[in-house]
Amino acid sequence: MSKKSRIALIVASVAICLAGVAIPAFAVDEELMTRYLNAANDQYTAGNYAKAFSYINTVLGSYKQESLPENVEVIAETIYYGYLSQIKDSRDGNAFRAVKEKLIEFPYLSSERVNRLVKIINTFEAQDAAWGGDPTRAVSSGGDSNPVLRSTLELQLALENAKKDAVEQNQRSNDERRKELLETQQSAYREAFEATGSTNRFVVLSLFVLAGVCFIVFVVVVVNTVLNLKNAKNQNDKFVETLRAVSQLSRLPQDALAALPPIYGVDGEMRMIGSAQAATGLPPPPTTESEKKELDELARKCRELGAQIDLATGRKNNSKNVSEMVYKIALEMGVAQYDAMLYFSVAMVYDIGFLEIDRALLSAENLTEAQKYEIRNHVKQGLAQLSFVPERYTNIFADGVLTHHENMDGSGYPEGLQGERIPYIGRLIRVVESFVALVSKRSYREIFDKESAVAELEKKPGLYDSAIVAALDRVI
């Protein structure tokens, strides 16, 4: 055998030996991951979702995304969904944060149903953070982390105390006036009886005094009615002026923006789920009688709340006018009848956050910058008031309440979203609300006719979706 042949034989032998060492090492790793995968599956079947979550994360950490076996990804998504379902019922904040961190690490597990659960749990957290079931407890404990909400509650408490003092003072004044009037009547009776000594004259005088008292009461009632009507008009005018001043502000301050749920933060990745297009992400139409009854009850509740919102803001029939126009434009743009009806209900309550703002603040003069931001924060407070909405409709209602003040160029609030990053329902309400305001009477300007109002919206493509404005022009 030649020298070259011997060298080649030695090299081949060494390669075979190295291969014999490497192959068992790889087999051991696969066997270990299989054991972890089986353990995760067993724990999930037994209902121990936390342990299943821990085991499956060990398996996921051993693979790169491109080499991850398909069966591992399917099992992992199932475990994540089961664990989130348990967290939704238990409200375990620490476990929820751990799941969100892992979703950032393994983004390919963010399926539609996983993202929907994350969005729902975030909404629940916003509700719990806003009130905690007790407004006073929110101020003394959890509310301390939310300076805007704390300031709002403290202002409401101060206004309630002032109102209570005014009522007590008015009651005391009324008691004193009644006492004084009674003494005057008694004095008049005595004088009349002593001066005339005649029962008939006393009766006549009593009737005269009684008629005088009735006349005074009538005058007081008429004056109070006139004053109340005047105050109502003044309150409406002040509210309109307040909205006008608030609209000139930029986005919410950073401390208020930080209080929004993570899915609606500036860097939120799940904002677009069920929202980017007109007919995407909405729950399927109801099929059973119970589902149909649930939807009918939701629509009825929205109409009731819409009337309450209009009463609080002094904008007569605003919710009705906005929701009807939203419904017509949605149909014009090709949205299905069922989806358009959902948009109609959302538009009824898009300003529900104003029910948590004290009316005295809405009609106050010379608002401070902080008070203007408190009023603007009605979008966030509105999110916390959606507990009446069934879970399957939570996403679309949250989109409408939170984003109806966003502008196409990013100058709106609360997040400064741009273009199609703004959910469709938010862009739709933004256009219709502005149109209704232009064709309605306002204290600071004249009424626009419909064509002029549309032309005014077309001048501002940075604020309004041009496709929706064009559909509005066709509808009217």
Image: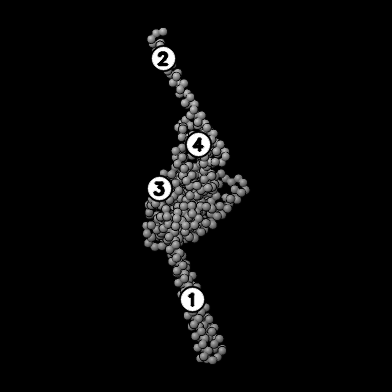
Give the residue pinned by disc 1. 175
- Mark 2–mark 1 Cα distance, whole angstroms, equals 117 Å
In the image, what residue type sits under mark 1? Answer: Asp
SS at mark 2 in the image? helix
| Image quarter in which the N terminus is found | top left
* Residue drawn at x 52%, y 38% as measured from the top left: 52
SS at mark 3 in the image? loop
Give the residue pinned by disc 3. 416
In the image, what residue type sits under mark 2? Answer: Ile
- Mark 2–mark 4 Cα distance, whole angstroms, equals 45 Å
Mark 2 surroundings within 10 Å by alpha-carbon count, few (fewer than 14), some (14 through 19), many (20 or more): few
Check if mark 2's residue and mark 1's residue have beta carbons within 8 Å: no
- Closer to viewer: mark 2 or mark 1: 2
- Of labels 1 and 4, earlier in sequence is 4
SS at mark 4 in the image? helix
> Residue 229, relative to residue 333: is it above or below?
below
Mark 4 surroundings within 10 Å by alpha-carbon count, few (fewer than 14), some (14 through 19), many (20 or more): many
In the image, what residue type sits under mark 3? Answer: Gly
Query: Is residue 447 visible to the viewer in this orientation of the structure?
Result: no
Give the residue pinned by disc 2. 10
- Closer to viewer: mark 3 or mark 4: 4
* Residue drawn at x 38%, y 50% as measured from the top left: 254
In the image, what residue type sits under mark 4? Answer: Ile
- In front: 47, or 185? 47
- Of labels 1 and 3, earlier in sequence is 1
- Of labels 3 and 2, earlier in sequence is 2
